[in-house]
Image (tube, rainbow, N blue to C red):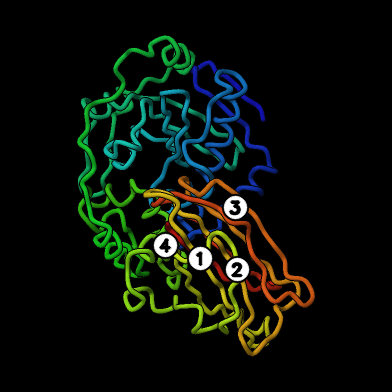
Amino acid sequence: MSFTLAESTEWWFEIPPDLQEQYWRQSQAHTTDSRCWNAYLNQLCLSLILDWIRTEEAPEATSWLIPEAASAVWEFVNGSAIQIANQRLVLIPTEVIEDDLEIPQEWVDIPSWAGDYYLGVEVSLDAESLRVWGYATHLELKTLGSYDPDDRFYFLDAQQVSTDLTTFSVIRQRCINEQTRAAIAPVQTILESQADNLIERLSKPLVTFPRLEIPFPIWGALLAQDEWRQRLYNQRLDPSHKQPARLSKWLQESVEALESLWQNPEVFLERNYVRKSRAEQEDGVKKAKLIDLGIQLRSQSVVLLVAIAPENEERVSVCVQLHPTPEERFLPQNLKLALVSTAKDVVTEKLEQEVDSREQDNYIQLKRFKGKVGESFSVQVTFGEARVTEDFVI
């Protein structure tokens, strides 16, 4: 990567061709071409500027969001953020020379998203470069900027944007006690049932701009929650994407009230299926679901078993097994069972584990792990090119 400080005091970065290819491939998991392009520009912008800041100024700097969570943001909103200690830099890339700084409302009025400084970034793919041309504080946006309620953007005239990037780093590092943020209202409280209904409504293909479909206080509350934002992204990407199974409810509700696809194991398995583990104590709950991997298994299904047991008021232990159906004595060979996750509040113990079935395995099992109520994880069953993912929230 090459960096240049021009006479105009702007920051200039060369975009290496290999990064263009890499991030173009990674940006394809979006619903439209324009959103793929938005993700592509943001990945280039975030990668180059974060790398330079880490090298030249602040080795501890991090991306505010992990890559998987960032994709869910870029499906709906332009922009990314860099965290340096208690300061946040919000990067807003565009492909055209702007006369003003244009910031989506989400980055300004959602408290958990708001930044201290907002940097305007022009990306020129023809010239294989990007330039950071100016910056403003959150306080300046709220007090000096104008707001467009139709498109939900804040605008700050170019004459009010600071363009001397040579002094920006000095100001950021030396004026840490200066007020950079204006007061903003907390996000509106919405119930989980409301969020479920909103996700169902906003995930429909006919909803072109979800961020403009509902009042901003409600949209901001939905987007501020990592799990809800990820679910909306997943469901828009794949309308068949299922809502996660909520394991804590399994400990509270009757069998009839549970998700219809998750049943008592005896529905799918013979009585002698139980494999002893601490997660399958008498005071726990076991549920099973039929998994169909289609022609890869020649119409043969397998049974996913999840057992949970409370450890205390906030933590549960989880055991995940994969069984053949009663019609089959053994699992197919080379069937994979994996624990994965993409959310920020993931279960960290035993994360990212995988086990393969061998010849004449009559079940396979992940190592037991623990998690707190509200944490999320996913389980993948893979055979050849076929893959089924089941999402869970404890």
- Label 2 with label 1: CB-CB less than 8 Å: yes
**Which circle marks residue 321 in the picture?**
2
Residue 146 in the figure: left or right of residue 306: left
Label 3 and label 4: CA atoms lie apart by 32 Å
Quarter of the picture holding the N terminus: top right
Q: Quick one: SS at disc 4?
A: helix
Tag nearer the camera, 3 or 4: 4
Nearest to viewer (mark 4 / mark 1): 1
Residue type at the position of mark 2:
Gln
Residue 24 visible here: no
Q: Disc number at residue 247?
A: 4
Spatial separation of the CA atoms under disc 2 and disc 3:
32 Å
Mark before the other along the chain sequence, 1 or 3:
3
Q: Secondary structure at mark 3?
A: helix
Side (left or right) of 11 relative to 230 = right
x and y percentages locating residue 260 in the rendered image: 39, 79
- Is residue 164 shown above or below 348? above
Residue situated in front as seen by the camera: 168 or 102: 168
